[in-house]
Image (cartoon, rainbow, N blue to C red):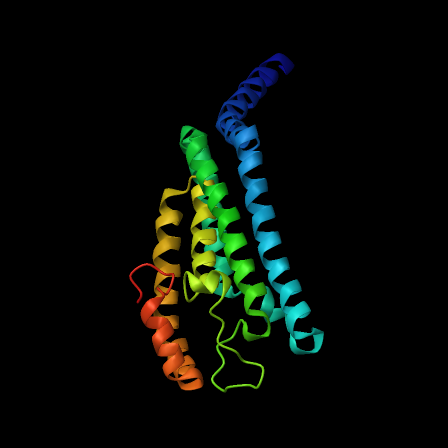
Amino acid sequence: MIHAILIPSQQLLNSIGSELKPCKESMTEIFTDTGFRQLTQMLLAIIFFHTSEYILARAIHGPSRVTLSSLLITKHYAFAMLVSILEYLIEITLFPNLKQHWWISNVGLVMILLGEVLRKTAIITAGRSFTHLIKIRHEEHHRLVTRGVYRIVRHPSYSGFLVWSVGTQVMLCNPVSAVAFAVVVWKFFADRIPYEEHYLKQFFGREYVEYAQRVHSGVPFVN
């Protein structure tokens, strides 16, 4: 009788083990060198980007004039990043070879670094004239900055963020999110730049108009 009970129990355990095997293999894929490296790079890129934005804002404008909004973490942004991580986990589980294209992943890593350098250089160069929020009133310390990276593009901080954000997805070898990030971020800046430059033309008049005529915005297809 005991033997009869043990046999079905053993069969049940074997069945459960067979069912769990794909899950174990999926978790193994996530914690391979590939998964660990790419997810770690993503986490470090996000932490460094937002922390450095906040620190620079405090250093330039002073602690009393800076809030946590300078971390630049919004609900929409957080949702987009979570979706990109979800895509990564699904794809490394179902299509692990997709994440093994190291030359693509390394291109993304270079994009992250270049985007960071460009954006932070723009912030430091502009100094107190740089703000995370668009100013609609001219303040005494506002200056039209046309030196350094601003000689190459008018909005280098936007260029840097566009390259950085898309780079995070290229580094993860996320085809869907890479395209989605490129489109969404581009659309955001395509709408933001004309609005911002409306006030810049009011602040600096002909000087800004001439500057805009000879220097590209820095965002593709946005004059």
Vertical order, 174 against 188 (above or below):
above
Residue found at x 38% / y 72%: 211
Residue 123 horizontal/vertical position (percent): 55, 65
Is residue 85 among the parts visible in the rendering?
yes
Residue found at x 57% / y 32%: 31
Vertical order, 142 against 36 (above or below):
below
Tell which of 53 and 38 is nearer to you. Answer: 53
Residue 53 horizontal/vertical position (percent): 60, 62
Residue 86 horizontal/vertical position (percent): 47, 46
Q: Quadrant of the N terminus?
A: top right
Residue 102 horizontal/vertical position (percent): 46, 31
Residue found at x 59% / y 74%: 128
Tally the marks: 0
Q: Residue furthest right?
A: 63
Position of 61 with respect to 148 (left or right) is right
Vertical order, 31 against 40 (above or below):
above
Q: Quadrant of the C terminus?
A: bottom left
Tell which of 96 and 22 is nearer to you. Answer: 96
Is residue 72 among the parts visible in the rendering?
no
Tell which of 46 and 139 is nearer to you. Answer: 139
Residue found at x 41% / y 76%: 196
Quadrant of res 154:
bottom left
Position of 168 with respect to 192 (left or right) is right
Q: Residue furthest top?
A: 3
